[in-house]
């Protein structure tokens, strides 16, 4: 490979980094839009901190756990020391790689924090701030990199033939299973499941939620497109097509499915249908034809409304639908690699099942243990009074929308 | 051309695709900001669905109508079969093209839906959801690709010497004339034109509207810059300069013109001045000097306030000013190609007039027929009661800004 | 250099241009979020106009003052004539440059307006619109280009060995010192400093403010990454890493510092901590190791809360914290080049101090004179009644959030 092609590949990976970064704003606005007005500062605070904590944690330890090089034990665990250091020899190896060491780190670092962000929406409106941030540190530092290593670092799942192009399992299902564990320990929001039935708690701003979904789609061009790990023209442009068609199909089927179920045009369902389609295509975005992509995304859009209803029936209270979008559609997309495309086949389907099951179990158990330890030590849930008054006033002494200067809460304290 | 240059060209076209995608978020936020609070979910729903429907429709039929290859009849119509299929032979032809088949499709697909989006703002706050979505399907599937073929697909307008670099006519005027037809059939919002005069109906969120305009300008770097169809350094960078200067000039002249007319500093006019400048430069963004661009954009900024006032005088009720921005400034920009720049001249001006007139008449008549048929069959207008209560509650059973959990409307239904 | 590498370099500079453009939306949303509801249209209007005015002014005169070529006097001042003109000879010099003349202009033009934007937040909620826009024209036309020429145009600071990679001094401190001068002449908002102490005036929308900070970080990839002035893989990717880690570290230390000071989790401080980290790393983003970047950004995050408190103690009323973020952290980041990294050393530290002091003094004095002249002629402050009623109604005859069609204020006037 020549210098010029290396530069173009590296440029695309840097741009993909920026796009994945923008997904953190997407998650922040989506989750802020879907919570109540009294908890908006809290969710913005968490989502802002997660990307910052995630990058720092990944610098110190995560990157070296996920990509330890040759230094690993049986494909389950490896570690190459703390901090960042450009490898010996020419850091730009025109022969062997498509991008620099720094590009590799920052692209992977932007991915790392998304797992914790998936959890943040699911536990919104009742979790204490600091325990959640501690959870995020531990999860991003250890859990995500270890399962990531199994596949992308060259570990045992990779050896076994598992395929997960851009992370339906390694990012989305991992985050989704962790979210489920966290919800189970934390319990539902007060007043959600009553003796008289399930009480809807609508999000406070649909424009924010819609902005979030568009930004996530926007960023997904880098999330999936960057996972080609080069600017290969046919590969990246095909990924753009499959990713976008799956999202579009998810919206259309979610529209009709939710209309069939609820007899109204439900914007939340359409938005989550798009996200479900995006999550589902992620495992095989480079393997599918446009028609495959439409079918995979379309099925995700059908799954979403049923899944949301199901979790509510069993009293799993997930304010943003993160388990439906990331866990359920992540599993579906992982399995779809064994059904559609050139890899489709019963053998591959079995391997895909094993892969998503093992990552799911690991993430669920790890998240459960971390949350449980936090529950026993710091406590993880705000008091009833705080939950009713809202986390913004109680944890942040400010409101998201101060209407007058007479309010006591201030953006800047003296 | 070598592999490396092909990769760079293809990369720029893929990035342009992402930028044009972001314009859909721009339209969504702009239109949401300019409607009343009670109709916000409805406009977000429509704009979210349009990009999804547009991509799917373009996959199935639109792309093959617009770029049928050699298979056409007299330059007015052609078709190359349903669905996508990579052409025989090497899909990456380093000698003949600048980007892959998939890049071509997804870039054009992101363009296609913008026509329908232009209409959505103009008919906001009183059109029924489903008929509008059906209109969008038909318009994006047939009307936009057919007139697009006339020029960009190598049809009769191309043969006649018409010039429309990035779509002042083919996208913006086409959408704007369709919007005008739709408004004429639909009628104004109730209470807009009264016996006592014209009642202003202000938009509910100027921050959303401003975000929308900035995002549209952001995306326009790809809309115009990508229309170079390569990463040619001089061509694309000149397009960046002319596009930005036209937008800037439109803002400044709209500021002074609207101050002259209304004696206040009108943010809506400045925002539409930017959009008018962007629409106007689009037909000749690659042909103009910076000074030409400033003049063309500046005249668009003068046109906007007069046009908005004029349409209100003749009781054409357009909540977002889409006809002024896209139709009027689209016509102006198309004609400007025959006045300014190297192509300027009376002969070219005549051809430009013929081009925008023929596309405008086709789009207007087609949209009129589709809307009229829908009016006779499904009906296109919500009831008086629904219009007064708002489309969000009536069509979506939710509000955009739920203030308390006690509200009955829910983001997620059970 | 070959054609292909030139194309890739030029492409990255064009993409950086788009990213820096998006910072103007970031500033608009950040500042809109941090002001009161009654002044939102006004701040949106100013931030929209600044980027437009900035581009036009830079076209006419600024670019030629900042990069006059050989035509200068003693390194303090130069001018190469009005307007834009592609240099004689081959405008694309594959041997001597990395990008076209147009790319150079539009990238620098997007930078130019940011100085004025920094001022707009600091003087928000009480400055008259037109005098502020006149200030912006003069500042962007003359002040920013002259000090910019001292360093980036090859003037005396460059000769003296001063180092400012992407503008901690030339953009941020310059804007910050100008903001300080403007605040001193303008005075605090009414009711901010009372006999009973300092009254907090909280921002009206924390989601808008958070969106703004994420967009600024997003744009900073182009602001710093583009300042490499090529797509050099190691250089740009290192800049991505140092920029992001400084931002992340600023958030974490601002969180703990503000908790230590105020005993609450203060979102505004975390957001400004991110910005402080970004401003501070800007002077040496290409010179620092990841560890250096974390330390520099981390110290900025500690500085922010103390600085905000300090300015309030001395009754410098800065609604958005622009002086703390841009002036104080700009100075800190400039000095840090003389402390950390390969340039660190007492001699360099002295030069850095001289550089930031001379630019700071020039910008402060120039801004002071312009504002003072405006105060004596047009007046710069709105009346007490206007300040209480809000600038939106008084200067723009509209409100940012019109709740009902019955309101008198209208988005579109008749």
Image (spheres, coloured by chain):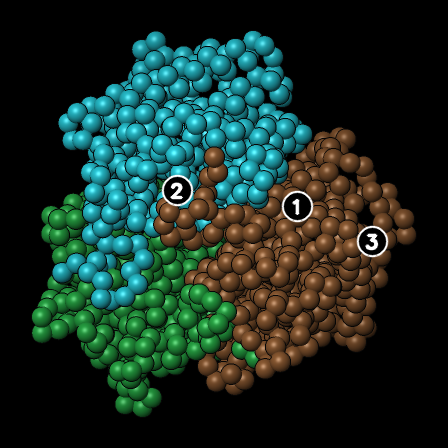
Chain colours: A cyan, B brown, C green
* Local SS, label 1: helix
Q: Which mark is residue B102?
A: none
Toward the left, the furthest residue is C196
Side of B236 relative to C313 (left or right): right
Percent x, y of residue A200: 42, 40
Whether residues under marks 1 and 3 lie with C-beta atoms below 8 angstroms apart, the answer is no
Give how far apart the Cα atoms at labels 1 and 3 are: 22 Å
Percent x, y of residue C223: 38, 54
Residue name at image x 87 percent, y 46 percent: B72
Give the mark nearer the N terminus: 1 vs 3: 1
In the rendered image, the quadrant that contains the C terminus of chain A is: bottom left
Toward the front, the furthest residue is A196
Side of C15 relative to C359 (left or right): right
Q: Nearer the viewer, residue C76 or C205?
A: C205
Q: Which residue is mark 2?
A: A201
Q: Nearer the viewer, residue C46 or A361?
A: A361
Residue C42 in view: yes
Give how far apart the Cα atoms at labels 1 and 2 are: 32 Å
Q: Which residue is mark 3?
A: B155
Percent x, y of residue C53: 45, 73
Residue B106 vs B373, above or below: the answer is above
Question: How many neighbours does mark 3 have within 10 angstroms: few (below 14), some (14-19), or many (20 or more)?
Answer: many
Q: Nearer the viewer, residue B3 or A130?
A: A130
- Image quadrant in which you'd find residue A194: top left
Subunit under mark 3: B
Residue name at image x 90 percent, y 52 percent: B74
Residue name at image x 61 percent, y 77 percent: B194
Q: Which residue is mark 1?
A: B54
Residue A286 vs C379, above or below: the answer is above
Question: How many neighbours does mark 2 have within 10 angstroms: few (below 14), some (14-19), or many (20 or more)?
Answer: many
Residue B47 vs C149, above or below: the answer is above
């Amino acid at each position: 490979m020549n210098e010029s092609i290396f530069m173009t590949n590296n440029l695309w990976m840097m741009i993909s980094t920026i796009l994945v970064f923008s997904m953190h704003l997407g998650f922040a606005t989506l989750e802020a839009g879907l919570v109540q007005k009294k908890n908006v500062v809290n969710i913005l605070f968490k989502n802002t901190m997660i990307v910052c904590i995630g990058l720092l944690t990944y610098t110190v330890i995560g990157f070296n756990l996920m990509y330890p090089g040759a230094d690993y034990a049986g494909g389950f665990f490896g570690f190459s020391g703390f901090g960042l250091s450009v490898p010996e020899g020419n850091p730009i190896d025109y022969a062997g790689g498509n991008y620099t060491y720094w590009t590799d780190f920052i692209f992977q670092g932007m991915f790392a924090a998304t797992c914790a962000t998936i959890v943040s929406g699911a536990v919104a409106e009742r979790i204490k701030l600091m325990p959640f941030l501690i959870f995020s540190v531990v999860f991003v530092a250890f859990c995500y990199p270890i399962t990531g290593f199994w596949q992308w670092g060259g570990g045992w799942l990779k050896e076994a033939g598992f395929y997960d192009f851009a992370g339906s399992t390694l990012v989305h299902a991992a985050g989704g299973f962790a979210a489920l564990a966290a919800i189970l320990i934390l319990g539902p929001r007060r007043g959600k499941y009553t003796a008289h039935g399930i009480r809807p708690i609508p999000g406070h701003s649909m424009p924010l939620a819609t902005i979030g979904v568009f930004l996530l789609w926007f960023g997904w061009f880098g999330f999936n497109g960057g996972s080609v790990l080069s600017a290969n023209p046919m590969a990246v442009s095909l990924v753009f097509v499959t990713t976008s068609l799956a999202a579009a199909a998810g919206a259309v089927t979610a529209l009709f499915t939710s209309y069939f179920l609820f007899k109204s045009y439900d914007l939340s369902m359409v938005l989550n249908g798009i996200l479900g389609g995006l999550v589902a295509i992620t495992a095989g975005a480079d393997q599918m034809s446009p028609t495959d992509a439409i079918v995979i995304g379309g099925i995700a859009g059908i799954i979403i409304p049923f899944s949301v209803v199901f979790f509510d029936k069993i009293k799993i209270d997930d304010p943003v639908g993160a388990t439906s979008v990331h866990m359920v559609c992540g599993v579906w997309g992982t399995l779809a690699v064994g059904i559609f495309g050139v890899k489709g086949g019963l053998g591959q389907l079995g391997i895909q099942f094993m892969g998503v099951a093992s990552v799911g179990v690991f993430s669920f158990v790890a998240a459960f243990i971390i949350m449980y330890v936090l529950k026993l030590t710091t406590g993880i849930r705000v008091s009833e009074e705080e939950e009713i008054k809202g986390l913004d006033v109680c944890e942040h002494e400010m409101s998201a929308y101060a209407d007058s200067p007479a309010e006591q809460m201030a953006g800047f304290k003296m």
